[in-house]
Image (cartoon, rainbow, N blue to C red):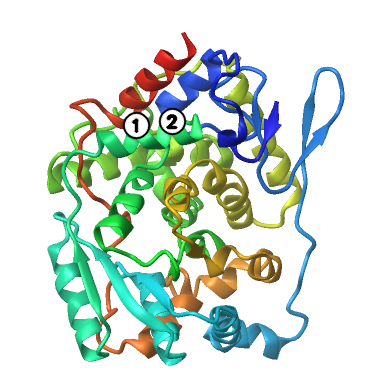
Amino acid sequence: MISDNLSEINADSDLEINADAQDFYLRYGFIAPPFTLYKNVYLLAPYIGVVMSNPLTFKTLYPVRHSFDNENAQHQVETGPQLLADLQHSLAQNESDYQVLFSGGLDSSLLLGISNQLNKTRCAIHCFMASMPQETTKAKKMCADTATVFKHVSIESDLSAVAGDFIRLTLEPVADKIALVIPALVTAAKAETGLAVLDGQGADSLFCGLPHDKLYDLYRRRGVRALSTFGTFLPVWKNKSSHLGRKIYRATKVLKCLAAPTPAAMLIQSLAEDTAIILPADNEVKQYLESELAELSKNLDDFHLVIRYLFMFRILPAREMQKYLLAESLNYAFKLPFLEKTMVDKYFYLDASCSIKQGIYKSPITCLAKTFWPGFLNSSRTSPFQVEFTTEKLTVKQFSLNCILKKTQ
């Protein structure tokens, strides 16, 4: 079975767990397309070609190349005017107002600024993060200064009921913890189902704003890599329950990544969530991911573009896009301008030098957001988005697999 949405598969189908996919999920927290948790069930994602052979095979496809063919056009992108015009055009397409998911970070601030400019903002919906309370204070002040209705929501501590609903609907294990937060957030905020919810998903991937982009630039420095060789033997810190623990975790994980023999190996290592789980060399999901990364590295001009491809067309469809599935089943509609086809077609091949300027990543978005919100965005601390919750005293992975195993046994 092949689908772009596992919820289309009848829940009564005779589904069998793919042990390789389950192990991959436990280590990496998601399952790389076209694989799913089930044997002989495949998930389509953008630019995956299906070869109808026996056995079935898949092919890596590429977007049509769009180039900015003169210096002025490139300058317009680097400094922001072209991107601003494209986003204004996108947001103007909807006749109704927007409910803006607003963390106070760069992407959501830019979209809120443009929505305000177009007089299309009904409200800003903000989720409180206990680890970063100052972001709530900042977001509230930004909305007060622009007379924007500010809906501030604290998510309840146990989301096991939401997790159960998600798994019953999608037949997927939860890969993105925020998949449970978003439906709880829009429901608690009493968002209107007749108005689109505006979200900045995809901006980091499209404009070199991922931590992996910074990691790759660090990886390219020979001196840094030489100092990181002991990362091969250093275990990744486990306890992330405190601010200090999270810092040590990130530092030890970076060292482990920098010790990788190739950029592709570095990228795969960076995706690991549980490094204690070691996959055998013949794990079919990891083998496919490694072979696709090798092909991407060969065919794309720059490794930043490899990172962009992997996240835009493989990881987001399998992980981040989960957060809209349950909410959409509750009749909420989302507007995702950075993931619209016209935007992706235009900016996918944008040279990394246009997105990374003088050490500023996601530079066009940073420049634009600061013009809308002077003095507010000197630093952005909302990545990664963190909301602490539980699922019946189990990890999200354990809860997911327990629910699915009950359905398949």
Could you tell me the amino acid type at mark 1?
Answer: Gly
Crowd tier of the residue under label 1, counting other residues whose Cα lies within 10 Å: few below 14, some 14–19, many 20 or above: some
Q: Position of residue 213 (x, y in %)?
A: 48, 56
Position of 157 relative to 38 (above/below): below
User: In the rendered image, which quarter contains the N terminus?
Assistant: top right
> Can residue 29 be seen here?
no
Q: Nearer the viewer, residue 259 or 162?
A: 162
Residue drawn at the location 37% of the way across and 67% of the way down: 192
Task: Determine which of the numbered discs, if any, sits on residue 164 in the image.
Answer: 1
Position of 14 relative to 175 (above/below): above
Position of 355 relative to 259 (above/below): below
Residue at the outermost top position: 409
Residue corresponding to mark 2:
168
Residue drawn at the location 32% of the way across and 23% of the way down: 398
Residue at the outermost right position: 53
Could you tell me the amino acid type at mark 2?
Answer: Arg
Q: Position of residue 283 (x, y in %)?
A: 58, 17
Q: CA distance from mark 1 to mark 2?
A: 6 Å
Q: Nearer the viewer, residue 98 or 295?
A: 98
Crowd tier of the residue under label 2, counting other residues whose Cα lies within 10 Å: few below 14, some 14–19, many 20 or above: some
Q: Is residue 357 left or right of residue 288?
A: left
> Where, by quadrant of the figure, is residue 228 drawn?
top left
Kindly state the secondary structure of the residue where label 1 is placed. helix
Kindly state the secondary structure of the residue where label 2 is placed. helix
> Where, by quadrant of the figure, is residue 341 drawn?
bottom right
Q: Nearer the viewer, residue 315 or 127?
A: 127
Q: Nearer the viewer, residue 270 or 221?
A: 270
Residue drawn at the location 58% of the way across and 34% of the way down: 6
Task: Determine which of the numbered discs, if any, sits on residue 208 in the image.
Answer: none
Mark 1–mark 2 CB contact (< 8 Å): yes
Residue drawn at the location 20% of the way across and 35% of the way down: 390
Q: Position of residue 98 (x, y in %)?
A: 42, 76
